[in-house]
Image: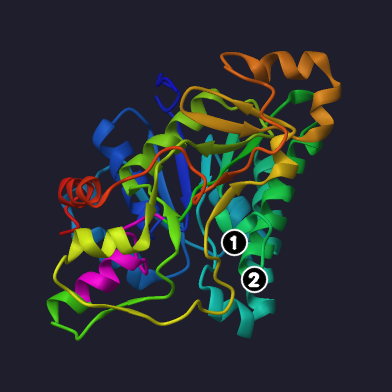
Amino acid sequence: MSQSHLFANKNVLITGGTGSFGRAFAKELLQEDVCNKVIILSRDEWKQWEMRESEPIFSHPKIRYFLGDVRDKPRLERAFDEVHLIVHAAALKQVPAAEYNPSEFVKTNVLGSMNIIDAAIDSGVERVIALSTDKAVNPINLYGATKLCSDKLFVAGNSYVGARGFPKFSVVRYGNVLGSRGSLIPFWQKLINEKAPFLPVTDPRMTRFWITITEAVNFVKSSFEVMHGGEIFVPKIPSMKITDLAQAMAPDFPVKSTGIREGEKLHELMIGTEDARHTLEFKDYYAIIPEAYWKHQEFMKKYKMNSISDKLAEDFCYASNTNSKWLSPEDLKKELSSNKHI
């Protein structure tokens, strides 16, 4: 994907802006210093204060901190005034918490998404990208089910914009961002630093996709550039074995299998065989196009621009255990070092 000046002189709003992705995305925009304003929308005043105090860049003259909840549509309408681009990163994400508090996850991840879409249309926003997760593909837990519902809502949002043709709504889907808050690497690093007796591994067969926070930020930026509305963008990224990650982080540390947790998958899936039928392949990513769009030749012309394949293999699926790209323990060690995780 190529970069242009889409963000020049634009007001960009990030929901869930104090999270790992939101902070990294805001920092990138502020360092580039081409946009007009970067607005952090989140519901926790303490996290906003912490973010502002953590680095000088987060006191940049162009940044704004806006308290609000995606459940509160009138507050979103106020926040979206004069906003051009939105990254929707706000979500409740913890799988066990979702099983015990399902209604809260529905309110934030589903109803909150509906509010984002409605407020963006009413406010005349130009483009919206919602962040998704591998857990939305063939979901086996409530969190994944709410994110699948959110994905469907954002794709369908393009049908409600009318003749003016905007906002454009698209989705970016990737796996866990390694090193982000609550992810495996900082948890294991804490155990290593504390000289714990072992590193817990739920299942030694487990595989995961590898994406860093920097790669995630760059992919979302690039997706803004190429989106036409309705796509689910999936990056081409390598896989890793969970045991290889443990070896890369602490080769002499014992590993203990603890069993797969409730709602957890052995392998990640980002494109299932059902979606593969209407997926386009590009050099660095895949784009899942709504099945209904394939019947309209004029629609498909713009989606197929620069694609290298519009017909994937009949049994294609993009899963972490059948991926063609893998990171070895040596590769992982280099990745960890370059991203300052160890």
Magenta stretch containing residue 59, yes or no?
Answer: no
Q: Is residue 174 left or right of residue 107?
A: left
Magenta stretch containing residue 187, yes or no?
Answer: yes
Residue at the spot 29% in from the left edge and 58% down from the top edge? 244
Q: Is residue 201 left or right of residue 155?
A: left
Residue at the spot 41% in from the left edge and 82% down from the top edge? 258
Q: Quadrant of the N terminus?
A: top left
The image position of residue 182, as x and y in percent, is 37, 69
What amino acid type should be assigned to the residue bearing mark 1?
A: Val
Quadrant position of residue 253: bottom left
Sequence order check: which comes first, mark 2 or mark 1? 1
Q: Quick one: label 2, few (<14), some, or many (20+) residues within 10 Å? A: some
Residue at the spot 15% in from the left edge and 59% down from the top edge? 342
Mark drawn on residue 70:
1
The image position of residue 17, as x and y in percent, is 42, 55
- Range of the magenta residues? 177-190
Is residue 171 or residue 80 the one in the foreground?
171
Mark drawn on residue 141:
2
What amino acid type should be assigned to the residue bearing mark 2?
A: Asn
Is residue 121 or residue 197 the one in the foreground?
197
